[in-house]
């Protein structure tokens, strides 16, 4: 297992933002991960860091990165995957086995752990549609437990993992047999659609900044509220989609939070709709970041 002290995490994130963490662990076996979860006190579990804004001030605790847990197995129409398996890889592998249901993962730069946490979705498909069961580590009892789909509390960009009690070790999905050509065609369509409106990772970003409000699109509301004209020295809005923030090079987490508040306020002023962030803030906050997070993450914090 790789262990690094005083590690600057920035380059492991798709936003290319983040300070030093006390110790970084990259386990390669599920047993190594569960051992860490049993022995460490202060830790966060992350996958590909594609849905997070990591604090430029770093994190005084430990970070466990799951990307070393890469095993998966296809048995008939069932797929078993460890938490660190990359979303595009599993999408590709099941397509080669004529299995449909994970075509949407082809363009997501995350892992299975992050995808289940978020109940990731795109192009009309989501994790909950094909999820069967998961093997989880229960932080309270320090035991490994199994949960069926009905116990996972899935809803839009939400699962039981948001409670913070469980860490996903692996998950099983049930897919449907389809001709390979149909699956590949859908994956191609998904990728083409993404390329036309979303930034590639050459423009550092963390995907959609805000969740879609019910029956509406955060991108549409932000566009109408005029945020595409927001362009600051280190951060800007992606010109083809108003719900993406781009790190122009040397952005700090505070620069991003500041822009998020401006976006949030623009929509609130025009529509009286209060957007909820999809991007998750992680790490130690400055006083200013505490204030900005209190505005943005108020609903989540009140729960
Ligand atoms: C360009 C771009 C496009 C994107 N498009 C989409 C999209 O269309 N749809 C969509 O839903 N998302 C999208 N995303 C967001 C993101 O890629 C996905 O949600 C992804 O599945 C998150 O996985 P991750 O490994 O990067 O999670 P991370 O960012 O590493 O973590 C996200 C959260 O999951 C938790 N987590 C991670 N692993 C585990 C685990 N094993 N157990 C418990 N908790 C865990 C973390 O603690 C954290 O709270 C996009 C991101 C980018 C950069």
Image: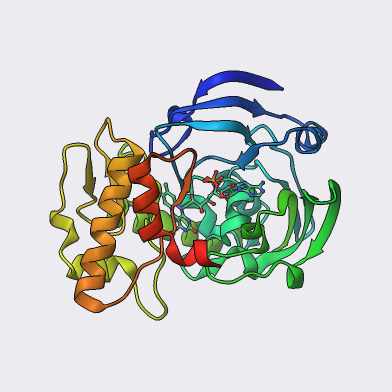
Q: Is residue 60 above or below residue 281?
A: above
Front-lying residue, 12 or 200: 12
Residue 215 falls in image quadrant: bottom left
Q: Residue at x 43, y 40 (%)?
A: 285
Which x, y percent locates residue 255?
A: 28, 42
Which x, y percent locates residue 201?
A: 37, 40
Instruction: List the single residue furthest toward the front.
Output: 287
Locate the C terminus and report the quarter of the image it occupies: bottom right
Which x, y percent locates residue 81?
A: 72, 48
What color scheme is it?
rainbow
Q: Residue at x 36, y 45 (%)?
A: 289
Instruction: List the single residue furthest toward the bottom.
Output: 215
Can see residue 80?
Answer: no
Residue 218 falls in image quadrant: bottom left
Indicate left or right for 184 with 168 as reference.
left
What is the number of callouts on the image?
0
Q: Is residue 280 above or below residue 234?
A: below
Q: Residue at x 36, y 68 (%)?
A: 275
Indicate left or right for 244 with 74 as reference.
left
Q: Residue at x 24, y 64 (%)?
A: 265
Locate the N terminus and report the quarter of the image it occupies: top right
Which x, y percent locates residue 192?
A: 36, 55
Q: Is residue 230 above or below residue 183?
A: above
């Amino acid at each position: 297992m790789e262990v690094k002290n005083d590690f600057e995490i920035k380059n492991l994130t798709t936003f290319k933002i983040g300070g030093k963490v006390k110790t970084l662990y990259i386990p390669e076996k599920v047993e190594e991960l569960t051992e860490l979860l049993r022995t460490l006190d202060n830790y966060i579990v992350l996958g590909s860091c594609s849905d997070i804004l990591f604090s430029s001030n770093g994190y005084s605790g430990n970070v466990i990165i799951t990307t070393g847990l890469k095993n998966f197995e296809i048995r008939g129409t069932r797929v078993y995957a460890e938490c660190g398996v990359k979303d595009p890889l599993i999408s590709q592998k099941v397509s080669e086995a004529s299995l449909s249901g994970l075509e949407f993962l082809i363009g997501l730069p995350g892992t299975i752990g992050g995808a289940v946490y978020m109940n990731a979705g795109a192009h009309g498909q989501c994790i909950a549609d094909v999820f069967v069961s998961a093997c989880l580590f229960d932080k309270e009892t320090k035991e490994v437990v199994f949960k069926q789909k009905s116990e996972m509390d899935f809803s839009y960009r939400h699962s039981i993992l948001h409670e913070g009690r469980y860490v996903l070790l692996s998950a099983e999905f049930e897919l449907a047999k389809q001709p390979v050509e149909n699956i590949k065609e859908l994956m191609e369509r998904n990728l083409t659609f993404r390329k036309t409106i979303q930034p590639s990772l050459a423009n550092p970003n963390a995907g959609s900044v805000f969740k879609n409000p019910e029956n509406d699109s955060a991108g549409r509301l932000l566009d109408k509220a005029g945020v595409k004209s927001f362009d600051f020295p280190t951060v800007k809005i992606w010109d083809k989609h108003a719900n993406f923030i781009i790190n122009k090079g040397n952005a700090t987490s505070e620069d991003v939070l500041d822009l998020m508040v401006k976006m949030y306020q623009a929509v609130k002023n025009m529509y009286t709709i209060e957007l909820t962030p999809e991007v998750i803030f992680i790490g130690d906050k400055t006083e200013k970041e505490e204030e900005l997070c209190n505005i943005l993450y108020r609903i989540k914090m009140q729960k």
